[in-house]
Image (spheres, rainbow, N blue to C red):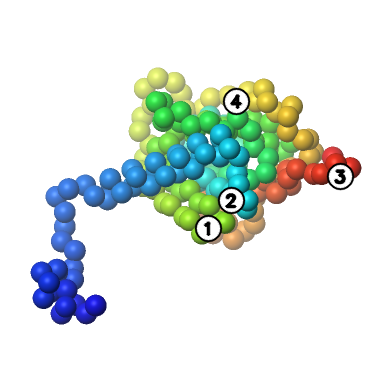
Amino acid sequence: MSDDHDEENGFDAAIPDSLMPYDSWIEDAYRQVMLRALDYAAGNGLPGDHHFYLTFRTDWPGVEMPDRLRAQYPHEITIVLQHQFWDLKVDRVHQIISVGLSFGGNPSTLVIPVAAVSAFADPHIRLALRFTVPEQPPVATDAPNVVPVQPAAAADTVEKAGTAAEPAGKDAEKDEGSQVVSLAAFRKRGPGGPG
């Protein structure tokens, strides 16, 4: 349709500024899509080739992760939920996501406030959602930002691969300063495979 046709039907080609917070509502709806996908994966596993990239601010109040990982990624990290993760949970009341992962062969549980998530992707279907996260996190009133993380109790169910999770290469570092931790080294091995 041409712009002339739009004007003839009473539509202006330029969208006017809104006094209603549509952008915020749309972002909230996208966050709900992310949470539903995570809920689905927690209850049913990841079907087919679906897998998730979850990018979050490591300096956000309430984020719980190993101190050495926080030192390595002081601002932002991207984790991959594909083959080797456990105890994925979405707590909608407290607005947190928790998941067990291994880093360098050490099982850990990450706790991520939903507000700290800056991106979610399912590369299998080329779905990528970005979220607005303020540059300055809110001031924590209860506990300090650094919380030690205990190994996950369910870590015994994860096959011990004995190799460290590695950053996904220099290209990931160039993308807006985010870091990617690849968990490809922790893929399940079939019977009789190395392990």
Place of residue 29 in the rendered image (x, y in percent of width and height, measured from the top left): 34, 45
Residue type beneath disc 2:
His
Q: Say if 30 sits above or below 170 in the image.
A: above
Q: Earlier in the sequence, mark 3 or mark 2?
A: 2
In-image side of 131 versus 182 (left or right): left
Residue beneath disc 2: 50
Q: Quadrant of the N terminus?
A: bottom left
Q: Cα distance, mark 1 to mark 4?
A: 33 Å
For label 4, the crowd category at 10 Å Cα-Cα, with few meaning under 14, some 14 to 19 and many 20 or more, is some
Q: Earlier in the sequence, mark 4 or mark 2?
A: 2
Q: Cα distance, mark 3 to mark 2?
A: 24 Å
Closer mark to the observer between disc 1 and disc 4 = 1
For label 2, the crowd category at 10 Å Cα-Cα, with few meaning under 14, some 14 to 19 and many 20 or more, is some
Return the residue nearer the eye: 65 or 119: 119
Disc 1 vs disc 2: Cβ atoms closer than 8 Å?
A: yes
Residue beneath disc 4: 149
Q: Label 1, secondary structure: give it.
A: helix
In-image side of 189 versus 53 (left or right): right
Q: Cα distance, mark 4 to mark 2?
A: 28 Å
Disc 3 vs disc 4: Cβ atoms closer than 8 Å?
A: no
For label 1, the crowd category at 10 Å Cα-Cα, with few meaning under 14, some 14 to 19 and many 20 or more, is few
Disc 1 vs disc 4: Cβ atoms closer than 8 Å?
A: no
Residue beneath disc 3: 193
Residue at 47%, 55% (x, y): give it.
Answer: 128
Residue at 36%, 22% (x, y): give it.
Answer: 141
Closer mark to the observer between disc 4 and disc 2 = 2
Q: Label 2, secondary structure: give it.
A: loop
Residue beneath disc 1: 125
Q: Say if 129 sits above or below 7 in the image.
A: above
